[in-house]
Image (cartoon, grey):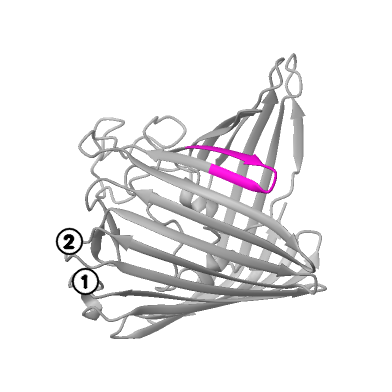
């Protein structure tokens, strides 16, 4: 998941609608990137997000957002030149703005004393509850090198079906709970679901954030590094100190593999910020005895680590550097990037 800092640049009131507003936020990135087998070249990216919100007479809040950078056909593997009827699995004529079966960076929510219901391109309950190792004190990089290495785990089993998720969440003081579902749009597979729990506490000079999650999909519908999977259970723990240091771990076990053996993932992340400078490093490892695990690597552990450095220039501009290294048991590859990130 991409980490960018967005600030509002436009605020427009809807005529005749109480407390309704639309904001436009954006980001731009420019620099260079390269790596193993990748020629050093220029990098540029532009992103615009529309966010809308309102409130009913009864006090319910509602809203929606769409990321134009991601508002495209959710099935990007459609063969070139092959377009069929809109809304089908090979539809290359519609995007998230006009196809109800696609998420495409769009999400809608309604919230009240009962909690919050969100639908669309949003985190499932397990991803909502757990903190990824790459999200611990991370300033980001223009090419996401630190979170795209082979040992990184981010979305768990989200996206196993069509990517559209419905999540309910609520908080009670320091405790939070969520449940989510993701449906198979073909009707072939049973609906997947996830549960998530959070607990935040202050202990002396540090903040502690704990997360626990469980996720299930229809028999072996999911895939982790070349092997089929049907469920996952995991936890995370993150501490943030007053001196700018943050540290955390994340552990996940996937079950239901065709070969009969579970796979485990372990991740650790560290972050540090002082004045305008920030740094982050994370490490991740997938392990299993399953015969189908990591086909290319013959079942060896899959590991990787990432590094991100940032310097805040003020006004929404930052200089970012990123590095990622992957080892699949056969070969080691790396990626890197350096550039300027601007938020608006």
Determine whether the residue tagged by mark 1 lies in a helix, strand or loop.
loop
Position of residue 63 relative to residue 148, above or below, is above
The crowding category of the residue bearing disc 2, from other C-alpha atoms within 10 Å (few below 14, some 14 to 19, many at least 20), is: some
- Residue under the point 31% across and 31% down: 87
Give the numbered dot on residue 258: 2
Image coordinates of residue 324 in percent, x first then y, are: 49, 78
Q: Which residues are magenta?
A: 167-177
Principal secondary structure, stretch drawn in magenta:
strand
Image coordinates of residue 29 in percent, x first then y, are: 62, 62
Res 318 quadrant in image: bottom right
Position of residue 179 relative to residue 274, above or below, is above
The crowding category of the residue bearing disc 1, from other C-alpha atoms within 10 Å (few below 14, some 14 to 19, many at least 20), is: many
Image coordinates of residue 77 in percent, x first then y, are: 29, 51
Q: Are marks 2 and 1 in contact (CB under 8 Å)?
A: yes
Marks 2/1: CA–CA distance: 8 Å
Position of residue 77 relative to residue 251, above or below, is above
State yes or no: residue 171 in magenta.
yes
Horizontal relation, residue 206 to residue 170: left or right = right
Image coordinates of residue 145 in percent, x first then y, are: 51, 72
State yes or no: residue 193 in magenta.
no
- Residue under the point 39% across and 37% down: 102
Horizontal relation, residue 161 to residue 22: left or right = left
Determine whether the residue tagged by mark 2 lies in a helix, strand or loop.
loop
Depth check: give the residue in front, 125 or 79: 125
Q: Which mark is first along the chain, 1 or 2?
A: 2
Res 12 quadrant in image: top right
Can you identify the residue that label 1 sits on? 290
């Amino acid at each position: 998941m991409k980490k960018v800092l967005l600030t509002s640049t436009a605020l427009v009131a809807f005529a005749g609608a109480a407390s309704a507003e639309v904001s436009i936020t954006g980001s731009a990135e420019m620099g260079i990137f390269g790596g193993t087998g990748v020629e050093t070249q220029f990098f540029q990216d532009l992103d615009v997000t529309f966010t809308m919100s309102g409130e009913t007479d009864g006090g319910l809040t509602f809203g929606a957002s769409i990321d134009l950078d991601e508002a495209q056909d959710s099935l990007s593997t459609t063969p070139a030149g092959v377009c069929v009827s809109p809304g089908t699995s090979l539809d290359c004529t519609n995007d998230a703005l006009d196809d109800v079966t696609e998420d495409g960076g769009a999400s809608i929510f309604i919230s009240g004393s009962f909690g919050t219901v969100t639908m669309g391109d949003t985190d499932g309950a397990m991803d909502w509850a757990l903190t990824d190792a790459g999200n611990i004190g991370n300033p980001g990089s223009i090419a996401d090198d630190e979170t795209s290495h082979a040992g990184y785990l981010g979305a768990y089993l989200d996206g196993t079906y069509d990517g559209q998720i419905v999540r309910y969440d609520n908080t009670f003081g320091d405790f939070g709970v969520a449940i989510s579902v993701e449906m198979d749009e073909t009707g072939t597979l049973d609906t997947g679901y996830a549960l998530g729990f959070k607990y935040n506490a202050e202990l002396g000079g540090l903040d502690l954030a704990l997360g626990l999650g469980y996720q299930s999909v229809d028999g072996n519908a999911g895939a982790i590094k070349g092997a089929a999977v049907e469920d996952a259970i995991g936890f995370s723990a993150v501490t943030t100190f007053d001196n700018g240091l943050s540290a955390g771990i994340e552990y996940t076990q996937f079950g239901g593999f065709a070969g009969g053996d579970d796979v485990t993932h372990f991740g650790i992340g560290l972050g540090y910020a002082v004045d305008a400078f920030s740094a982050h490093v994370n490490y991740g490892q997938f392990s299993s005895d399953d015969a189908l695990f990591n086909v290319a690597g013959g079942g060896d552990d899959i590991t990787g680590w990432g590094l991100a450095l940032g310097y805040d220039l003020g006004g929404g501009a930052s200089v970012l550097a990123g590095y990622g290294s992957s080892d699949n048991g056969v070969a080691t590859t790396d990626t890197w990037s350096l550039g300027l990130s601007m938020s608006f």
